[in-house]
Image (cartoon, helix red, strand yellow):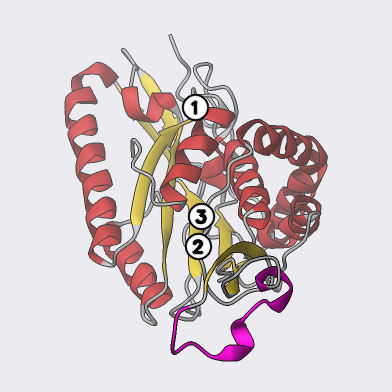
């Protein structure tokens, strides 16, 4: 039998609890940052594949000069080796700004015997590894509301240093301000909140037209609901206790409600042109990062 109890203090004072949670995140971050580097190295995927001509500094190819083009675009050194004129084309460069948000609220601490990691740890690894892959493809990445976006090979370490501060103000969903219309958002959490509240905050985040990807992280028992007999559930956010006499009697209704909640989240995201992906923590981190990287690059994949 799988224990349904989520170990969380009840009635504790807010200040010490927040300090303890921030300290807890800081303690595990070196290990999670190392795992994120290893996962990113395994995937080693160029997110955007922006290999086309345009404005930029990176040489792409020579092509014949077309009548009517500005003469200052001619590469005279290359043209001198042939009996025709050539233009030096440069690779199109269009660095985007990605804003990363990782849910560090108390419900993310949950882990069952079926999971490979807690939801919090897996969310951190996914976020940091994706940030590394985005930087490799030339994008800037910042923590939403915490850091400026940067393009740096040390992005994992920079973001990991800033994450404990986000634990001090952890919420189930960010509540603005909205990034610019050309920015992109990457939201990773369990999104355990009423759909009306999710939709309200999501609209505030996207009211300037920014696109992005929302990743719902769940423990496998939250999907399977494998509980039987008398079971006590403990809410991690507020310590609410709920004891039921026959948990298996409510399994079907629970699964229907979970499916409806996921469908509503997906619909809200897709209505704004976002991608939505639901994942469970019994899958390897590298597999999850690869799938999300494909989605960020626009390549079809399971979602």
- Would you place residue 43 above or below residue 59 in this image? above
Q: Position of residue 138 (x, y in %)?
A: 64, 61
Mark 3 and mark 2: span between their CA atoms?
11 Å
Residue 244 visible here? yes
Quarter residue 143 falls in: bottom right
Which residue occupies the extreme front position in the image? 83
Q: Residues within 10 Å of mark 1 (few under 14, many from 20)?
A: some
Residue designated by label 1:
5
Mark 1 or mark 3: whose residue is earlier in sequence:
1
Q: State the SS at label 2.
A: loop
Quadrant for the C terminus, please.
top left
The residue stretch that appears in magenta: 66-79
Q: Is residue 172 above or below residue 111?
A: below
Disc sitting over residue 52 in the figure = 2
Residue 237, image x and y in percent? Answer: 51, 49
Q: Position of residue 291 (x, y in %)?
A: 45, 37
Q: Please report the residue visible at 67 percent of the width from the left and 57 percent of the height from the top.
A: 135
């Amino acid at each position: 039998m799988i224990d349904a109890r989520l170990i969380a203090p009840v009635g504790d004072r807010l200040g010490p609890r927040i300090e303890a949670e921030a300290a807890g995140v800081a303690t595990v971050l070196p290990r999670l940052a190392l795992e994120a580097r290893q996962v990113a190295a395994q995937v080693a995927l160029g997110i955007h594949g922006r290999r086309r001509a345009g404005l930029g500094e990176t040489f792409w190819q020579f092509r014949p000069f077309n009548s009517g083009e500005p003469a200052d675009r001619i590469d005279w050194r290359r043209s001198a080796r042939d009996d025709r004129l050539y233009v030096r084309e440069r690779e199109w460069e269009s660095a985007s700004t990605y804003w990363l948000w990782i849910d560090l609220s108390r419900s993310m601490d949950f882990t069952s015997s079926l999971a490979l990691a807690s939801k919090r740890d897996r969310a951190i690894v996914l976020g940091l590894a994706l940030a590394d892959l985005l930087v490799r493809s030339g994008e800037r990445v910042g923590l939403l509301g915490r850091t400026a976006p940067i393009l740096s090979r040390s992005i994992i370490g920079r973001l990991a240093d800033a994450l404990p501060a986000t634990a001090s103000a952890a919420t189930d969903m960010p509540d603005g301000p909205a990034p610019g219309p050309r920015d992109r958002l990457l939201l990773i959490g369990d999104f355990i909140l009423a759909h009306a509240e999710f939709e309200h905050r999501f609209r505030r985040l996207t009211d300037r037209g920014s696109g992005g990807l929302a990743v719902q992280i769940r423990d496998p028992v939250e999907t399977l609901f494998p509980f039987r007999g008398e079971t006590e559930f403990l809410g991690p956010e507020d310590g609410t206790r709920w004891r039921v006499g026959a948990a298996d009697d409510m399994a079907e209704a629970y699964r229907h409600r979970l499916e409806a909640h996921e469908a509503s989240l997906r619909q809200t995201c897709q209505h704004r042109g976002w991608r939505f992906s639901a994942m469970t923590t019994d899958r390897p981190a590298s597999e999850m990062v690869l799938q999300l990287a494909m989605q960020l690059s626009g390549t079809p994949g399971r979602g």
